[in-house]
Image: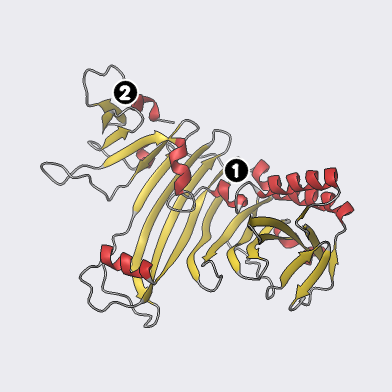
Amino acid sequence: MSARVFLRRPESVLITVTGACLLLGTTGAAGAVECVPPAEQPGVLRMLAAESRKTFDGLRTWEGVFEVDDVEFYFGERATRFLDDHAPNLTDRPAEFKKLNHARVTFAVDCARDLLLSRFESTDVCLVGLDSGQRLDVTLIPFIQTTIVTPEFSLQFSSNVRVAAAEGPGRRLAYLGAREEVARQEWGIVVDPREFPRGYGRPTWENLQMTAEFVELNGRLEIDGLALRVEKEGSGDQQEYRVVLPGKAGPGRYLFQEMTFRADAGFNTTQVVMRETTGPVRQQMRWAYLRQDDLWLPSFIERTVMTADGKRTTTQRTLRLVDSRANRALPAEVFTYRSLGLADEDQMLDERSGQLSVYRQGELIPLDSSTSESPARSAEP
């Protein structure tokens, strides 16, 4: 399986002032940039919305594997606090370092039943000095967590973590909780491929559709003299659209969300940049796609977050699709306790009710015999 990474030419800084377009820097070799007039913008936005939604609508099931590289940069007080907490005895402390976490994510999605399996398994975690490029003498424990999300609840289990017990090595404990609890872990240890089209906030097609409706109703979209910009460049497979949405970040502060859509990616989003009017990039995302069964599946996703001044990277996540099967029948056991990784005598805590159960031979048995029926009994999707 191969994936194409679509890399753009060097970025141009785009500033839109009351409909006037100022392009600072190169325009590239793809050809002249055509500014789409406001009267034609809704049609282009609706076309991009429809194209970017096709895969979402056509996807019934999807399972596969992503290789994940997470990089966190530490400098200043943040670096000091991290080493104080995780390596208090380290004598040779670098002023700046990065944390590298290489992981493998196995996932399965059943769109019709709204079910997700996400297994995040770190394979290598280390700290590297930014100046020396050498690993620090700090041991970080790899993290493993399997998550199953259903319409009503979520199940989470870390197979390499034991809860302390009065005697013995401790117990392995799974947790049953509200579905909403998983939302805060998205773009972290829970990887849901259905969230990739969102970028920032709503799904891309919803933003485009809402913007088209606003322009149709009001004739244009403008915030304090900063106008929506839609650009077209190139033709055929090299055709590219750029949509620049103005937004207000505070008194006298404005952000532009620059979205790029390419024909050779099915007019899906290939880049989103959050940029201040003064130029610094705050956040950036890039996508590449694999064409499989008439679907454009995200095969490369890179998300970068910068410091407030846009000068340094704080975090970066890269996902590369290494195995993929779309719209195939999923094995019956995918969304079961066994896939969660439970073994006999592991326990599960229902955080909604406080009920504690033990797993034996594929069933959850309440530990409190006075409870006639455990809420966890219904946790099998």
Gap between marks 2 and 1 measured at Cα: 35 Å
Q: What kind of element bears circle 2?
A: loop
Of mark 2 and mark 1, the one earlier in the sequence is 1
| Amino acid, disc 2 | Ser
Residue 200, numbered circle: none
Is residue 3 rendered to the left or right of residue 81? right
Q: Residue furthest bottom?
A: 132
Q: Where does the N terminus fall, quadrant-wise? A: bottom right
- Mark nearest the camera among 2 and 1 is 2
Label 1 sits on residue: 327
> Which residue in the protein does label 2 denote?
374
- Whether residue 87 is visible here, answered yes or no, is yes
Q: What residue is at 60 percent from the left and 43 percent from the top?
A: 327
Give amino acid for label 1: Asn
Pointer 1 local density, CA inside 10 Å: few below 14, some 14–19, many at least 20:
some
Position in image of residue 316 (x %, y %): 49, 65
Position of 127 with respect to 290 (left or right) is left
